[in-house]
Structures are given as structure tokens and as C-alpha cells.
Image (cartoon, rainbow, N blue to C red):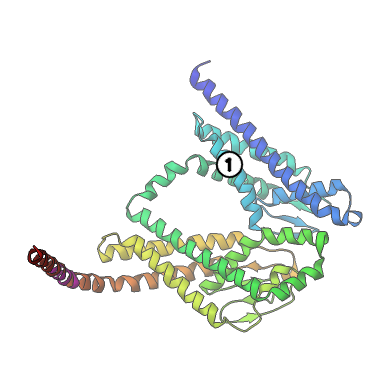
């Protein structure tokens, strides 16, 4: 057999075993968590086999393909679960990066990963609780192939964005804007939990303390990324919804019937943002726009920098819309049909804000450069005078 064919077969074989290992590790970890949630109330929660099936269901559902929960259509996914299953494919890409035929390895990995998920679907049904078959398999294929390929080609794909060009600077500026808003959203979410700690702790006690509250605690940890993205939507302006009748935004806040979930205790009670939150909103927008402008200037003419700022604002809005789409979805019928932020409203609002602030900052750049040119001769003259004074003092001492 030629060497090239043997290397291709070896790479495909390694990718297949890596895919099966990824699915096995993911399902195994999910089953362990499911059993840990089942044990405190084992007498009333069915048999251990039901808990194991629930673990398989959770692993498949984490890929964001949707499904049914006790007969209700659900699509809301705690993003911590999606991050966990995505990390498996990213880690697999690190293993396959040294393959002689990376494209064949990626294709083999995603195909075997999806095939293993096809088998796992047969063990994920619990009465009227099941995943949506075709959307879930498509989601498994997308998650495994995209993240594995991104990990394999991370250096090659990121190389153009390390250069100084219109597109690269626009992408860097857009990512910087999202990073600033995610950091500010984390601060806002943490501050809300601390400020409403009594309500959060009260809800935790109501749903069960100790081991009985472990399942709720697990779900709460996995939904932290969703809360951060909803906080970003709040800082941008449109806000977010938590079921029918509950809309939280800086300008208004209406509260409907909410489930007894501890993290929801951090929702504000007032009819608008408080002064510290308004300050955080303004400072986040200004800081994000300042970072974007600093990246796109790079000795460019103002009209070229303005184009990069507009492109970066559009990309930042697209990134935010994508994150909001991932973090939102129905958690049941009736009141819980809408959870999360409107992706298009958040995207358009962020793009408009960054474009306006970025262009405003760029309008002052000519003034700053003019002042720098004026102050430069004066500074040079002062340095020259100080140097002459030092030379004269040295001559007199001699």
C-alpha cells in the first residue's frame, strides 16, 4: 500500500477512535451528573436506568438541537452544557492537528461523532421526553466539525487576523467590543446576585437545601453563560424576557409569574435601571468604542478609519446577535415560550451605538493630532533649553 494511502487510513482511524472517545466521555460525564441528581430522591424519581437515560438525553440536548420535555417542546439550552460538549471536539482537534491529512481526519471525526450520536439517540427516550432526531443530529454534525476544524486550523486561520489590514482590524475591533460587553455583563450579573442575595438564598431554600437542591444548583451553574449574555442585552438597551409577562430592560421592568429558580431572584424589582447601572452602561459603551477606535486608527486616514469602525460595529452587532440566539429559546409551553433576548434588536442596537460613538471619537482625532503637532515644537524647544542649561552648568563647575 502506498505511503500516502496508509497515512490517510491511519489518520482516519485515529479520528474515528477520537470521536468515539469524545462521545463516550461526554455521555459518561453526563450520566454521572444525572445519577448524582437522582440519588437524593431515588425513591420517587424512577430507577437508575431512567437516570442514565436522562444523562444520555442531556448530552444530546446540549448540542442545541431541541427536543421534548414531558410532551412540551423545548429549545432553551444552558450554554454551559454546549460549552462542555464543544470542548470535547476542540480537544479532539488538538489531538488531530498533527495528522498528515487533517481534512480527512476532520471529516472522519465529525462523521463518526454523528454516527455515535445516532446510536445514543436510541437510549435517550424517556416516555414523552426525547430529543428532536434530525435537528439534533445536524447540530451534532455542526458542533463536532466546526470546533474540530477550528482547533486543527487555529494557527492558519488566525494568521490573517494578526496582520494590519482593513478586514483584520475590523474583526479585532468587533471582538474587542464583545469582550468588553461580556466582562461588563459578568460584573452586572454578579452584582445583581450579590445585591439580591436574600431572595436568591430564599429561593434556594424553597426548592430544597443540601443534596435535594443539587439538581437545581447544577442547572444554575450551566445557565450562568446565559445570564451573562442576557446582562449584555440589558446593557445594550433592549433587555430580555423571562417567560410571558416578564420583560427586563433599563427603561422598564414588568414581572409576571416566574418559576422558583434561584438565579431568577437576581432580577431587578424597580421600574428602570439604577444610577450605578446607568453609569456602567455608559462607561461600557464608551470603553468599547474607545478600544475599537484605538485598534482601527493605526496611522490610517480618518475616512478609511471610519469605514473600519463601521465594519467593526456591524461585526460586533452580528456577534452579539449570534450569542443572543444561542442563549434564548422556549423552555416549555405557555408562559415559558420566550426566554432570553431578541437577537436582532440587540444586534442592531449594539451596531448603531458603536457606529455612533466610534465616528464621534474619530471626529476628534484631527483636533488631537493638530494639538500634538503644536505641542511638539514647544516640547523640543524646552528639551533643548534644558540641555543647554545643563551644559553651561557643567562648564562652570569645571
Q: Inspect this view and state whether residue 56 appears.
A: no
Residue at the image position 73 percent from the left and 58 percent from the top? 218
Q: Is label 1 in a helix, a strand or a loop? A: helix
| 356 relative position to 226: left or right | left
Q: Magenta includes 380?
A: yes
Compare residues 255 and 275 and report the one nearer the observer.
Answer: 275
Q: Of residues 144 and 87, which is closer to you in this image? A: 87
The reply, left or right, for residue 32 in relation to residue 293 is right
Q: Which residue is mark 1?
A: 91
Q: Is residue 271 found left or right of 358 in the rendered image?
A: right
* Location of the C terminus (image quadrant): bottom left
When the figure is inspected, residue 200 is found, relative to residue 166, above or below; the finding is: below
The answer to whether one can see residue 214 in this image is: yes
**Majority secondary structure of magenta residues:** helix
At which x and y percent is residue 234?
A: 56, 72
Could you tell me residue 130's position as x and y percent?
77, 51
Q: Which residues are magenta?
A: 375-382
Residue 373 quadrant: bottom left
Residue at (42% x, 46% y) in the render: 158
Q: Quadrant of residue 269?
A: bottom right
Q: Position of residue 26 (x, y in %)?
A: 69, 44
Q: Residue at x 20, y 72 (%)?
A: 370
Q: Vertical placement of 86 versus 188: above or below?
A: above
Q: Position of residue 57 (x, y in %)?
A: 75, 49
Task: Please say whether residue 212 is one of the residues in the magenta stretch.
Answer: no
How many labels sit on residues? 1
Amino acid at each position: 500500500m502506498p505511503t500516502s494511502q496508509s497515512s490517510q487510513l491511519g489518520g482516519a482511524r485515529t479520528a474515528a477512535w477520537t470521536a468515539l472517545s469524545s462521545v463516550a466521555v461526554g455521555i459518561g460525564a453526563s450520566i454521572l451528573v444525572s445519577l448524582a441528581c437522582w440519588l437524593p430522591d431515588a425513591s420517587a424519581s424512577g430507577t437508575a436506568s431512567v437516570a442514565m437515560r436522562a444523562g444520555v438525553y442531556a448530552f444530546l440536548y446540549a448540542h442545541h438541537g431541541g427536543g421534548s420535555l414531558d410532551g412540551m417542546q423545548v429549545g432553551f439550552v444552558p450554554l454551559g452544557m454546549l460549552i462542555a460538549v464543544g470542548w470535547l471536539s476542540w480537544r479532539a482537534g488538538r489531538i488531530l492537528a498533527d495528522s498528515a491529512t487533517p481534512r480527512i481526519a476532520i471529516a472522519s471525526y465529525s462523521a463518526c461523532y454523528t454516527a455515535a450520536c445516532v446510536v445514543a439517540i436510541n437510549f435517550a427516550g424517556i416516555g414523552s421526553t426525547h430529543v428532536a432526531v434530525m435537528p439534533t443530529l445536524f447540530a451534532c454534525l455542526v458542533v463536532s466539525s466546526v470546533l474540530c476544524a477550528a482547533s486543527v486550523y487555529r494557527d492558519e486561520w488566525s494568521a490573517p487576523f494578526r496582520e494590519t489590514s482593513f478586514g483584520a482590524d475590523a474583526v479585532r475591533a468587533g471582538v474587542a467590543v464583545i469582550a468588553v460587553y461580556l466582562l461588563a455583563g459578568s460584573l452586572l450579573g454578579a452584582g445583581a446576585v450579590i445585591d439580591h442575595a436574600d431572595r436568591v438564598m430564599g429561593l434556594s431554600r424553597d426548592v430544597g437545601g443540601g443534596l435535594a437542591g443539587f439538581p437545581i444548583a447544577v442547572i444554575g451553574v450551566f445557565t450562568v453563560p446565559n445570564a451573562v449574555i442576557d446582562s449584555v442585552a440589558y446593557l445594550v438597551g433592549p433587555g430580555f424576557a423571562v417567560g410571558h409577562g416578564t420583560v427586563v430592560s433599563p427603561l422598564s421592568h414588568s414581572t409576571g409569574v416566574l418559576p422558583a429558580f434561584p438565579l431568577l431572584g437576581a432580577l431587578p424589582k424597580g421600574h428602570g435601571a439604577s444610577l450605578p447601572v446607568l453609569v456602567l452602561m455608559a462607561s461600557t459603551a464608551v470603553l468599547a468604542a474607545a478600544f475599537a477606535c484605538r485598534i482601527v486608527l493605526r496611522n490610517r486616514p480618518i475616512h478609511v478609519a471610519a469605514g473600519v469602525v463601521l465594519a467593526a460595529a456591524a461585526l460586533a452587532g452580528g456577534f452579539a446577535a449570534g450569542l443572543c440566539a444561542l442563549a434564548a429559546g422556549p423552555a416549555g409551553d405557555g408562559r415559558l415560550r420566550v426566554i432570553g433576548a431578541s437577537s436582532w434588536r440587540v444586534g442592531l442596537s449594539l451596531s448603531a451605538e458603536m457606529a455612533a460613538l466610534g465616528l464621534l471619537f474619530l471626529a476628534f482625532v484631527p483636533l488631537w493630532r493638530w494639538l500634538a503637532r503644536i505641542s511638539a515644537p514647544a516640547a523640543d524647544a524646552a528639551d533643548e533649553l534644558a540641555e543647554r542649561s545643563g551644559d553651561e552648568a557643567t562648564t562652570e563647575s569645571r
